[in-house]
Image (cartoon, grey):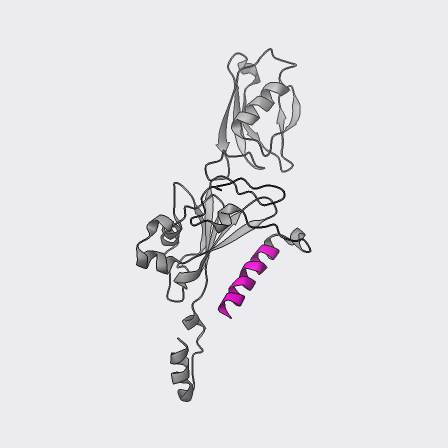
Amino acid sequence: MKTYLLSLCIALVVVTAYPPCLGQTPPPPSPVAAGSNGAHPSTPASGNEPQFQERDSRYRIQAGDTFDISFDLSPEFNQLGVAVQPDGFVTLRAVGDVKVQGQTVPELTQTLRTAYAATLNNPIISVVLKDFQKPYFIADGQVARPGKYDLRSDTTLTEAIAIAGGFIDSSKHSQVLLFRRANAEWMSAKIINVKKMENDGKYQEDPFLHPGDMLFVPKNRFSKIKPFIPTAGVNAFAKSY
């Protein structure tokens, strides 16, 4: 029964997060989902299988980001605070609109060089991100302070739980869920037995979080006890645990 409920919880989260996936047959799990610590895939996926984003991959420009553009030899083309519009385009001086969303800074630099090639001969361009989405993780469920937190450095699952205030009395330490985006359509769900890991001292199994990860701590069975239990049922209740 417990396994059925947990599987149902995972299925509901995935379906809720990705409605377009309804009616489709999910692809086989990638090597990461079956791994011990959620690190990089050990073998490449093929076909339509979800491919996990690398934890140390380069940041990609998003709508709402801003950046400065500097031309070493033609400072009259410099632009400060260039804002990425909701449709992913920016407006450049002497060039017009150019789509930049989804590009890394090196890719953006090359895009700008190409855009200005008709105006400048082999321009030397520097791009500096000024305002962008900071890496983050989300802690939800039975933690003291659920919410969205900055991911400032290498942070493990247990460290993230501590940042969120730690477990509370109703937490189920043995079935912490770690959700991670595989691609635009799929998200993985992995169960981490934090209680066993800590009792065994196997902290090498404590997975590092990736930007955008969400951890969910479910309720333990004791938290579902009714405020009042018939005296005759106390012994039966105790034996069930």
Q: Position of residue 216 (x, y in %)?
A: 47, 57
47 on left or right of 155: right
Specify whether residue 35 is painted magenta: no
User: What span is colored magenta in the figure?
Assistant: 1-15
163 on left or right of 58: left
- Residue situated in front as seen by the camera: 48 or 187: 48
- Residue situated in front as seen by the camera: 22 or 32: 32
Specify whether residue 6 is painted magenta: yes
Residue at 40% from the left image edge and 62% from the top image edge: 174
Relative height, residue 175 to residue 224 (above, below): above
Whether residue 91 can be seen here: yes
Quarter that holds the C terminus: bottom left
- Residue situated in front as seen by the camera: 197 or 59: 197
Main secondary structure type of the part rendered in magenta: helix
Whether residue 142 can be seen here: no
The furthest residue to the bottom = 232
- Corner quadrant of residue 107: top right
Residue at 50% from the left image edge and 39% from the top image edge: 133
The furthest residue to the front = 43
